[in-house]
Image: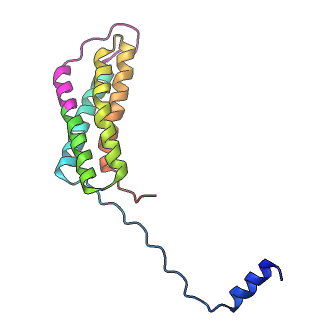
């Protein structure tokens, strides 16, 4: 008898087992968007993003030197404070052993923020400045968006 036929006979003769219970879905991670630390991060990121978008709108696209940005020193200090809060949030999530994606994203934003701010500060021409402002605006938008997005179960 071939192996296939033997297996079919054995399965047909075996008592019927109950169907396996449905695999329990991994629990959906709990959102941290309502917690004070994360609310603060979202608020600060959105405020800084508005400032960056305003500067972007005031920066000419044509070639020429980049003009000084009004209030940039205060902005730079606020961006540094936001980066520190992002790292604090990363460490908070790490201590909870929670939401690996958000934890990692917040760390990345914390590390990237000073580089993006420096790129704005160091841009010599208006087009370079506009590009640096665009990239910083996207980072700030992501900073708020990853926190407020509904959490997804791990895959």
The residue under the point 26% across, 32% down is 50
- Whether 5 is drawn above or below 77: the answer is below
Residue 124: give x, y in percent of width and height.
34, 10
Quadrant assignment for the N terminus: bottom right
Q: Position of residue 82 (x, y in %)?
A: 21, 36
Query: At x 40% / y 60%, what residue is drawn?
Result: 153
Relative height, residue 19 to residue 85 (above, below): below
Q: Residue furthest top?
A: 64
Residue depicted at x 25% and y 54%: 32
The residue depicted at 37 percent of the width and 7 percent of the height is 64
Locate residue 45: give its quadrant.
Answer: top left
The colour scheme applied to this rendered structure is: rainbow
Relative placement, left or right, of 106 versus 41 is right
| Relative horizontal placement of residue 116, taking residue 72 as reference (left or right) | right
The residue segment tinted magenta is: 58-80
Q: Is residue 46 magenta?
A: no
Front-lying residue, 117 or 58: 117
Residue 35 locus on image (x, y percent): 19, 53
Quarter of the image where one finds residue 58: top left
* Total marks placed: 0
Name the spot of residue 25 as percent of width and height, x first: 43, 69
Left or right of residue 23: residue 5: right
Residue 90 against residue 111 in the figure, above or below:
below
Q: Is residue 103 above or below residue 18?
A: above
Q: Nearer the viewer, residue 8 or 137?
A: 8
* Farthest-out residue, right: 1
Q: Is residue 72 magenta?
A: yes
């Amino acid at each position: 008898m071939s192996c296939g036929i033997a297996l079919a006979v054995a399965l047909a003769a075996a008592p019927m087992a109950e169907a396996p219970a449905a695999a329990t879905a991994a629990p959906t991670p709990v959102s941290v968007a309502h917690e004070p630390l994360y609310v603060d991060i979202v608020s600060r990121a959105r405020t800084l993003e508005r400032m960056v978008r305003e500067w972007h709108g005031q920066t000419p696209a044509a070639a020429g030197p980049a003009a000084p940005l009004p209030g940039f020193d205060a902005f730079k200090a606020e961006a540094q404070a936001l980066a520190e809060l992002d790292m604090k949030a990363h460490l908070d999530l790490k201590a909870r052993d929670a939401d690996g994606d958000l934890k990692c994203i917040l760390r990345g934003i914390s590390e990237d923020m000073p580089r993006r701010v420096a790129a704005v500060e160091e841009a010599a021409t208006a087009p370079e400045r506009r590009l640096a402002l665009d990239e910083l605006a996207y980072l700030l938008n992501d900073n708020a968006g990853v926190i407020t997005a509904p959490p997804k179960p791990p895959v």
